[in-house]
Amino acid sequence: MTVYGFHASHEQFGPGALLDALRAAERAGFGAGMCSDHLAPWSTRQGHSGHAWTWLGAALQATDLSMGVVTSPGTRYHPVVLAQAMGTLGEMFPGRHWAALGSGEALNERVTGDPWPPKDERNSRLEYSVEVMRALFAGETVHEENGPWPVREGRLWTRPDPV
């Protein structure tokens, strides 16, 4: 079955206007939504960049849509912290939250001051992050000293439902 979704572009609209647009999209018959997770807009002309995770909670509460986010674990969000955010939304809004994980973009990630690695290293970091997050979602306690982002006794106390 085809589902038509609304893309909430945080770079183009302020968070309040974006939430209004999402509600209008739901009234118009859209069946899902998703948003970008940018720290900065692509250009100063766009002029916005609301915090995706804060906004997602409001969007899920304000609509009945399933909501996704395109995000990158690692540099800006430690995989344990990202898993906690996903677990919280997944528990509060069962079956309605999803994430598409990528290897990141310099535009958003380099603000931490870390050097911007080549694509093969970013892909390896993404694989590591996904392994950590899957283990946390499965209820495991993670202790990983050797990855790009060490995890010491990481555990999700609130996990998404359904897992």
Image (spheres, rainbow, N blue to C red):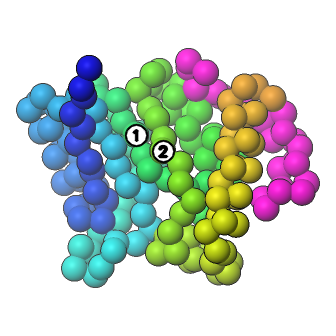
What span is in magenta?
A: 141-163
Q: Nearer the viewer, mark 1 or mark 2?
A: 2
Q: Return the disc, 1 or 2, that comes first in the chain's sequence.
A: 1
The quarter of the picture where the N terminus appears is top left
Q: Is residue 153 magenta?
A: yes
Can you identify the residue that label 2 sits on?
100
* Residue that numbered label 1 is attached to: 68
Q: Residue at point 24% right, 73% down?
A: 46
Identity of the residue drawn at 57% across and 59% down = 103
The foreground one among 129 and 124 is 124
Q: State the residue in front, 53 or 29.
A: 29
Identify which residue is drawn at 24% across, 37% down: 5
How many other residues sit within 10 Å of disc 2, few (<14), some (14-19) or many (≥20)?
few
Q: Secondary structure at mark 1?
A: strand
Q: Amino acid at mark 2?
A: Ala
> Quick check: marks 1 and 2 in contact, CB under 8 Å?
yes
84 versus 44 height, above or below: above
**Residue 63 position by quadrant:** top left
> Is residue 96 visible from the viewing direction of this image?
yes
Quadrant containing the C terminus is top right
Q: Position of residue 78 (x, y in %)?
A: 68, 55
Quarter-of-image position of residue 58: top left
Camera-side residue: 27 or 54?
A: 27
Give amino acid for label 1: Gly
